[in-house]
Amino acid sequence: MTAARATLVAVAAAAAFAACRQPAPPGTLIVAQGNDPGSFNPAITTSGNVHPVTDQIFNGLVGLDEQMNSIPELAESWTVGDEGRTYTFRLRRDVVWHDGQPFTSADVKFTFDEALLKYHSRTRAALQAVLERIETPDAHTAVFYFRQPYGPLLQRLDVVEASIIPKHLFEGRDVLSAPANLSPIGTGPFRFVKYEKGLFVELARNPRYFRAGIPKVDRLVFRVLPSALTAVMALERGEVDYVPSVPGADLSRLQTMPAITVARSAGGSGGSFCQDVLIPNVTRPPFASRDVRRAFYMALDRRFIVDRVYFGQGTPSTGPISRKLAWAYSSDVATYPHDLPAAERLLDAAGFGRKQNRVRFAVTFTHPTGQARLGQVMREQLKQIGVDLTLESLDFNASVEKTFVKKAFDLGYASFCNGSDPEIGVRRVYVSSNIGPVPFSNGAGYRNHEVDGLFDRAAALLDRPARAQIYATLQRLLTEDVPYFWIIDSDGARAFRSTFTGFRLWSGAFAETVERAGRP
């Protein structure tokens, strides 16, 4: 099939379309976006509100196929030398930025030195201490030199983990506030057209994309719909074409509709093996006490939460690595079954007895608005052991800011994606070097030098079974300490209009190969 080719409509028509006052023009794919992105620099954030949009605009050095194997992208080939200490990437010569400037190795070096290694929580946590330097002997060669062997590099260079940004637009500017963050220029299949805050983001097909024949749609619109219920209703009415996360209560109904396809992703969002996690602030009472953390965890009926809050879309977590990341997962961990009497005994022993009002202590749960039901269920469960849970519901970006940047919280929330390797998405949550005002980093403020050392040892090995043994030890240590409350290994579902085919459900660049079924 050939790509659908529709003429882009005028700005006025785009605004009218975004408000759903008229049907979308042919060749357009409309995606429900849960929260407003706020900005569009993927090299400084791991936000799940930014990357669904920017992963269509930018590229990584490599891509990942459905089995999570590395495949060429901006780099057409690579070699590994010195037992994993040197990686040499040969870059494509036919890539230009959306503004017509050539893509070169200088963009790669700048992106890592000035953005990824400073502000991207996953890249910063893993590479800042071990990556010695990047050299660019010519415009189409980038060489990464490591202080020690580093096995997982190729797994962390895709568009989600390491989007390459244009040096010529950011050099000499603050990458956190540069104008290009709101008018992004990439190398990817779609180029930026328009952004109406709180309403929509409009992208258009990049006619000079280096992969021939794609993308296969002319226009991509992300419509901001904070309510999952509203997003599903919009799909059923034909107002959007793709919903990235379907509430469990709607699954059975959507599965009976021939015009809608429901697809499950066993790895969670983007094949990234995501976990929903509660973040206790371990730097201050009451969660500075390990016994309090253990008691709190035992008071949560996680099986009930998975069944009633998440409608069975996943499995109760057992620790910091999702069981879906099978090669690194270990079930040999400390466990905390739902046990209210045991939780009460631990709290008594920790010096948090019940007061005259029967309350032991109060905790504020700072969470995005989408987690209101989770907060309500937790409040009722914790009440049984004398913990008064106050719910502080904020919009997503404000919740992230208060938890990770300002550190002004008792208990926070995040969906942490493990990635295809624990070095990508797990390390950043636990190592002490990643404590700082960086979104989706070590928000708990957890410090354990033994844990830090084990993550370093695992990263320095090239043999996967040997690395898995170290991760098994890490899982035992972390579940004994309970620096986070692991709730669910996600098993999400997406839904889309059956007239579209070709979604890459495992990839951040999910819309790159989408086309309308049956079109000539």
Image: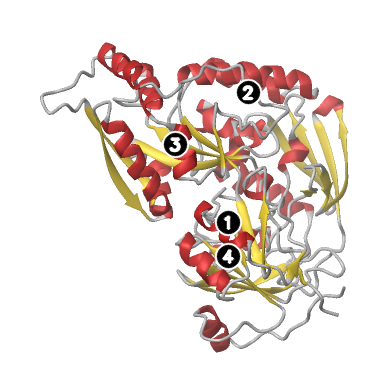
Question: How far is the residue under mark 2 from the one under mark 3?
Answer: 33 Å
Between circles 1 and 4, the one closer to the viewer is 1
Vertical comparison of 454 with 409: above or below: above
Q: Earlier in the sequence, mark 1 or mark 2?
A: 1
Q: Earlier in the sequence, mark 4 or mark 3?
A: 4
Vertical comparison of 418 with 252: above or below: above
Q: Earlier in the sequence, mark 3 or mark 1?
A: 1
Q: Is residue 436 visible?
A: no
Between circles 1 and 2, the one closer to the viewer is 1
Density class for disc 4 (Cα within 10 Å; few <14, some 14-19, many ≥20) is some
Q: What residue would you read off at disc 2?
A: 455
Quarter of the figure with the N terminus = bottom right
Q: What residue would you read off at disc 3?
A: 304
Q: Earlier in the sequence, mark 1 or mark 4?
A: 4
Between circles 3 and 1, the one closer to the viewer is 1
Q: Position of residue 16 (x, y in %)?
A: 52, 85
Q: Position of residue 250 (x, y in %)?
A: 53, 58
Image marks 2 and 3: residues in contact by CB distance under 8 Å: no
The residue at the point 79 percent across, 57 percent down is 104
Q: Secondary structure at mark 4?
A: helix
* Amino acid at circle 1: Ser
Residue 296 sits in which quadrant? top left
Density class for disc 2 (Cα within 10 Å; few <14, some 14-19, many ≥20) is many
Q: What residue would you read off at disc 4?
A: 180
Between circles 2 and 3, the one closer to the viewer is 3
Between circles 4 and 3, the one closer to the viewer is 3
* Amino acid at circle 3: Phe
Q: Earlier in the sequence, mark 2 or mark 4?
A: 4
Q: What residue would you read off at disc 1?
A: 252
Q: Secondary structure at mark 3?
A: helix
Vertical comparison of 336 with 435: above or below: above
Question: How far is the residue under mark 3 from the one under mark 1?
Answer: 20 Å
